[in-house]
């Protein structure tokens, strides 16, 4: 193996494309793209987060939702990551998104994105947004036999080496099981 070194860079594969949604002080929904986030406990998500209009909303309301970006929504999902609601107040509507209030937290679900983590704000400190996951919801259209089905959901991932969005590929193994063959 001959390795190429890239220095200190925030590169991992795959990275999720998370669409973080919140309500502003007037109840107008907003959304932003976040690719540096991951679950950090059974009921916790942590996102590397700068200061945005979204973070003002999240701190004021104490809540946010995190939806998976999907193949059929690449353009609006990228749009909400390159435009700020502080400059374009109707950004959410311009993205073509429609909001339904979460039953669980004071934040919007995005009708166009079928799978969502509904979160209560735990903390926003030191560039880390931490949320308590109080519910996960998925539209029936992406559920098979009661389980969320990635082949129906078609989530995308972020390629930080090339600034690209990638499709998530087919199943290649069974977790907690395939390794048993070497035990
Ligand atoms: C692919 C992509 C990934 C991004 N990931 C993050 C991230 O992890 N953390 C962050 O603070 N901003 C991230 N951003 C930037 C925000 O989405 C962007 O600044 C957005 O306009 C903020 O919107 P707002 O000001 O309306 O809240 C990302 C943008 C893109 C396009």
Image (cartoon, helix red, strand yellow):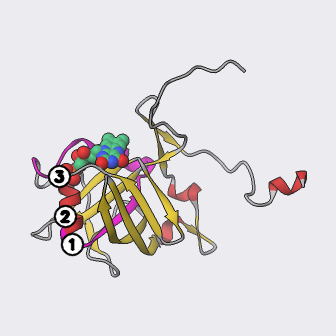
Q: Is residue 38 above or below residue 102?
A: above
Q: Are marks 1 and 2 in contact (CB under 8 Å)?
A: yes
> Closer to the camera: disc 2 or disc 3?
2
Quick check: 139 left or right of 124?
right
Q: Is residue 77 visible?
A: no
The residue carrying pointer 2 sits among few (fewer than 14), some (14 to 19) or many (20 or more) residues within 10 Å by Cα, namely many
Q: CA distance from mark 2 to mark 3?
A: 14 Å
Q: Secondary structure at mark 1?
A: helix
- Give the mark nearest the N terminus, 3 or 1: 1
> Which numbered dot is residue 57?
2
Q: Give the percent coordinates (x, y) of residue 118.
A: 38, 71
> Which numbered dot is residue 134?
none
Location of residue 119 by image quarter: bottom left
Work out which residue is located at the far front of the displayed protein and give it: 126
Query: Mark 3: is the Cβ under 8 angstroms from ligand 1?
Result: yes
Q: CA distance from mark 3 to mark 1?
A: 19 Å
Nearest to the observer: residue 104 or residue 122: 122
Q: CA distance from mark 1 to mark 2?
A: 6 Å
The residue carrying pointer 1 sits among few (fewer than 14), some (14 to 19) or many (20 or more) residues within 10 Å by Cα, namely some
Quick check: 42 left or right of 27?
right
Query: Mark 2: is the Cβ under 8 angstroms from ligand 1?
Result: yes
Q: Give the percent coordinates (x, y) of residue 43.
A: 49, 72
Q: Is residue 33 visible?
A: yes
- Residue beneath disc 3: 91
Quick check: 92 left or right of 18?
left
Look at the image and say whether residue 81 sits in the magenta stretch. yes
- Residue beneath disc 1: 61
């Amino acid at each position: 193996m001959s390795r190429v070194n890239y220095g200190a860079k925030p590169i991992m594969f795959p990275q999720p494309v998370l669409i973080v949604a919140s309500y502003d002080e007037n109840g107008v929904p907003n959304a932003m793209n976040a690719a540096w986030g991951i679950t950090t406990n059974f009921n916790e998500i942590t996102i590397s987060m700068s200061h945005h209009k979204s973070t003002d909303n999240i701190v004021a309301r104490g809540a946010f939702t995190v939806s998976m970006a999907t193949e059929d929504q690449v353009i609006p999902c990228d749009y909400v990551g390159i435009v700020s609601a502080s400059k374009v107040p109707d950004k959410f509507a311009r993205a073509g998104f429609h909001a339904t209030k979460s039953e669980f937290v004071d934040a919007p679900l995005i009708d166009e994105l079928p799978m969502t983590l509904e979160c209560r704000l735990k903390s926003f400190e030191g560039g880390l947004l931490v949320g308590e996951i109080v519910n996960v919801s998925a539209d029936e259209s992406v559920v098979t036999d009661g389980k969320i089905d990635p082949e129906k959901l078609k989530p995308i991932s972020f390629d930080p080496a090339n600034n690209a969005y990638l499709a998530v590929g087919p199943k290649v193994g069974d977790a907690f099981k395939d390794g048993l063959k070497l035990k």
